[in-house]
Image (cartoon, grey):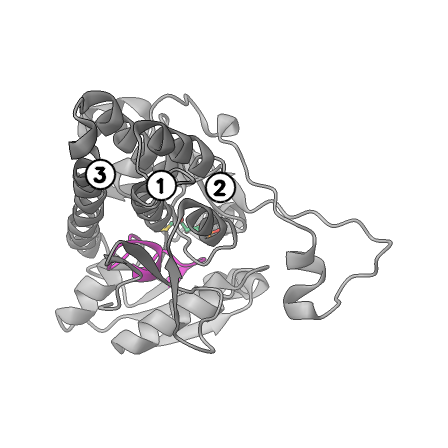
């Protein structure tokens, strides 16, 4: 995955518009905080690490109505961007880092450069974290050739390489034969549109299935491992990820197939003891009932659209981070690895 999902160029934030893939590869330019907020909320930029990086750059775009940059405009931007999406903790982690810069830099004139420097550091660190997750995950998948994933936890969802897809890229680059089965991922089809797009671009064999087909594949022994990303991992290892991840974990356990979660340390929320406390984003009716303007559900029917579910740590074979892997995750092991 060599495409850069986001970049800060000439004082603007350029994002690959993920709502338009795979039909067209176009870039959306954000010139202010409001446009950045809208891009995060509409999933132009999506995936937990990418949301955090975009928000950090978004803070750098803040200015007063008269065009001047001020400490207060940065603080307002941080507060505002924190309302864009509730589940991925990377958003709040990145905004906390930006807030710490505002708090610690006394010189107003130096603040814009220091904030941009911090956003760039967050971006660079993510690239390295994904690379390291790829290395650690590749060791776990060394005997696997057919891997199932859900949603998109690839380069599009991060700075580059991804989390769940990083080990796949690592193995592919080293000549290991690996193919990916990508759940379509209703309702917004991140698997069919995005995972299939970026893997195809990289030359990795990929097969798309509708979400309800995964049980049959697991039952018939066609999958060696399941690997997914995460939006927030509680201190005990319970992991929130795209809706549909939890049933996949149950199926994997039933069929004795390893179920891996790959995530950087920025996705852990040590303040939350368990996954039932993770805020789950509820999205609009139209994404389910009226996708792409096609009416699928009668007006009289109710629709629910939770964007994420929580997989209990007990169903997770191992969590792969940039610092290494935790088998049978629990609070003590995670605290030791992540130095809480
Ligand atoms: C490396 S990204 C991991 C998760 O953020 C990803 O699996 C996911 O659920 C994204 O959801 P989305 O609603 O598309 O932002």
Q: Earlier in the sequence, mark 3 or mark 2?
A: 2
> What residue is pinned by disc 1?
62
One can see residue 313 in this view: no
Dots 2 and 1: beta carbons under 8 Å?
no
Q: Quadrant of the C terminus?
A: top left
> What residue is pinned by disc 2?
84
Judged from the image, the secondary structure of the residue bearing numbered disc 1 is: loop
> What residue is pinned by disc 3?
112
Chain part drawn in magenta: 148-163
Residue 295 picture location, percent across and down: 75, 67
Q: Quadrant of residue 337?
A: top left
Q: Nearer the viewer, residue 53 or 205?
A: 53
Q: Residue at x 18, y 22 (%)?
A: 106
- In the picture as drawn, the residue positioned furthest to the left comes out as 174
One can see residue 32 in this view: yes
Q: Quadrant of the N terminus?
A: bottom left
Q: Earlier in the sequence, mark 1 or mark 3?
A: 1
Spatial distance from mark 1 to mark 3, Cα to Cα?
Answer: 9 Å
Q: Neighbour class for label 1 at 10 Å: few (<14), some, many (≥20)?
A: many
Judged from the image, the secondary structure of the residue bearing numbered disc 2 is: loop
Judged from the image, the secondary structure of the residue bearing numbered disc 3 is: helix
In the image, is 253 to the left or to the right of 115?
Answer: right
Spatial distance from mark 3 to mark 2, Cα to Cα?
Answer: 22 Å
């Amino acid at each position: 995955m060599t495409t850069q999902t986001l970049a800060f160029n000439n004082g603007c934030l350029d994002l690959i518009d993920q709502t338009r893939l795979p039909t067209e590869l176009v870039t959306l330019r954000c010139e202010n905080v409001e446009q950045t907020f809208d891009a995060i909320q509409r999933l132009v930029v999506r995936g937990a690490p990418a949301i955090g990086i975009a928000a950090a750059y978004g803070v750098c775009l803040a200015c007063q109505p008269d065009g001047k940059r001020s400490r207060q405009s940065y603080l307002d931007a941080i507060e505002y961007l924190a309302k864009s999406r509730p589940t991925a903790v990377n958003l709040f982690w990145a905004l906390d880092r930006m807030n710490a810069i505002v708090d610690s830099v006394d010189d107003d004139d130096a603040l814009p450069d220091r904030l941009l420097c911090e956003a760039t550091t967050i971006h660079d660190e993510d690239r390295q974290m994904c690379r390291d997750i790829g290395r650690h995950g590749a060791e776990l998948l060394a005997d696997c050739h057919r891997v199932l994933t859900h949603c998109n936890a690839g380069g599009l969802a991060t700075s580059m390489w991804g989390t769940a897809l990083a080990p796949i890229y690592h193995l592919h680059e080293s000549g290991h034969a690996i193919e990916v089965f990508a759940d379509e991922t209703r309702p917004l089809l991140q698997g069919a549109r995005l995972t299939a797009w970026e893997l195809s671009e990289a030359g990795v064999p990929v097969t798309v299935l509708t979400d309800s087909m995964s049980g049959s594949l697991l039952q018939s022994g066609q999958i060696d491992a399941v690997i997914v990303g995460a939006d927030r991992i509680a201190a005990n290892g319970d992991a929130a990820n795209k809706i549909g991840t939890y049933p996949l974990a149950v199926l994997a356990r039933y069929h004795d197939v390893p179920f891996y979660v790959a995530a950087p340390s920025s996705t852990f929320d040590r303040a939350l003891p368990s996954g039932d406390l993770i805020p789950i984003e509820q999205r609009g009716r139209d994404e389910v009932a009226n996708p792409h303007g096609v009416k699928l559900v009668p007006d009289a029917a109710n629709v629910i659209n939770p964007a994420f579910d929580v997989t209990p740590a007990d169903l997770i074979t191992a969590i792969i981070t940039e610092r290494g892997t935790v088998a049978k995750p629990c609070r003590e092991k995670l605290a030791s690895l992540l130095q809480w």
